[in-house]
Image (cartoon, rainbow, N blue to C red):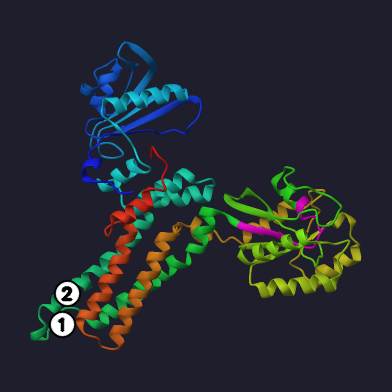
Amino acid sequence: MSFSLHEREDTIVALATPQGVGAIAVIRLSGKDAIRLVNQVFKGKNLETAASHTIHFGTIRDGEKIIDEVLVSIFVAPKSFTKENVVEISTHGSSYIVNQVIKLLIRQGARPAKPGEFTQRAFLHGQFDLAQAEAVADLIHSDSESSHQAAISQMRGGFSNEIQHLRSELIHFASMIELELDFTEEDVEFASRQDLRVLVEKLLREIELLIASFDLGNVIKNGVPTVIAGKPNAGKSTLLNALLNEEKAIVSDIAGTTRDFIEDEINLGGVIFRFIDTAGLRETTDTIEAIGVSRTQEKMKTASLILYLFDLSDTDMVEINRDINKLENLGVPFLKVANKIDKANPLFINKLREKHPDTIFISAGQKENLDLLKNRILELVNLDKFRTGNTIVTNIRHYDSLVKTRQSLLDVLAGLDHEVTNDFLAMDIRRSLHYLGEITGEITTDDLLANIFSKFCIGK
């Protein structure tokens, strides 16, 4: 999705609130003719003489027919979200009313907005950079305190400022190297190679921190996939229901009740965890159950956290040690969760505490020690850096550009080591600047913008 110059000059219209019946709906227009077009169908104050950031009561009319009583908000360029004239019409939430008003405005000369077109216009007019524009979409979709805070920080320019800082430091040396290319015959050095090495090594350290933060950022944005694993009848479905505080999974004394995985989300400490109740881990001749067990093993490999749940009344130490060894070889962080303490032998509990002191003892059925389990789960998600204000990368596009930047800077160091000519050195520095510029939008293509903004909702 790309926009021609003519399309960028159109006045666009779209519903800015969710589809469906509600108390109110907000219809948004943006473009040089936005105020004039609405004024043609609005009976009340003359909107073309109204001051910016004012609200006016009146009616929207199709000829003499009243469609609705509305409130119209006026934002005069450049003091608006898109830096164009913007009008927001608050109507009653009837889908019939919304459709009638939008069709009327289209007949007056507006055209339907494409996904993300309002935000794209804001970016193109310099309201914010590309990373901040993407944060708008993240903010809309944030569903936890941590994802909301990450989006707010990025939208307010925290990440962009860091990228701009990295880029500006490198631009100086890039210009000096380029200058040397114009004076190759004079054999002069405008850029100290040692100073360049020190700068590149410093930038690499900062970029490595940003790249490393993506694991945490991905968790903040998309949630923590957490697999509940264990043999049949360990109480996995009961634990899922207890954590969710609803009867999500079928609970039965019959082994192998869960044939496939069941997934739902819970907010713990401002972080979304996607808990996955899986088929039991055991050898089985049941074809359907075997498929479920196979899927369980695949889910465990891709999880960020595994809750290894076992029944204290029906599991011996040999079996527990065997399962723990398998999990350690898997390389995924896991918690040892001993279930049904209300039915367990106290001597076995003491033995287990001695052998595996980090075990969490719960009763999923009685909802005992669940708060302790939740706290231990949160401890494994390190939010300390995030909560102290450090920049966190949450966007896969930004991560990819940073990885490419790192490689380009490593190529600069390799070039310095091998004393390559200035033209090759300049090429690697330019590539580094290019990839950093892609993040904030100094370097863009129509295809890149189309890919980013096509993922936005219409009306934003």
Q: Quadrant of the C terminus?
A: top left
Q: Amino acid at mark 2?
A: Glu
Look at the numbered discs 2 and 1 and tell me whether their residues touch, using CB distance below 8 Å. Answer: no
Residue 95 place in picture, x, y as percent: 46, 25
For label 1, the crowd category at 10 Å Cα-Cα, with few meaning under 14, some 14 to 19 and many 20 or more, is some
Pick the residue in front: 108 or 240: 108
Q: Secondary structure at mark 1?
A: loop
Residue in the image at 39% along x and 17% along y: 68
- Left or right position of 87 against 179: right
* 172 in the magenta segment: no
Whether residue 54 is visible? no
Q: Is residue 453 above or below residue 170?
A: above
User: Marks 2 and 1, Cα distance to the nearest angstrom?
Assistant: 11 Å
- Left or right position of 426 against 236: left
Residue 47 place in picture, x, y as percent: 25, 22
Q: Secondary structure at mark 2?
A: helix
Whether residue 101 is visible? yes
Which residue is tagged 2? 178
* 230 in the magenta segment: yes
Residue in the image at 48% along x and 57% along y: 388
For label 2, the crowd category at 10 Å Cα-Cα, with few meaning under 14, some 14 to 19 and many 20 or more, is some
Q: Amino acid at mark 1?
A: Glu
- Figure label count: 2
Q: Which of the labelled discs sits on residue 189, or is there none?
A: 1
Q: Which residues are magenta?
A: 225-238
Lower position in the chain sequence, tag 2 or tag 1: 2
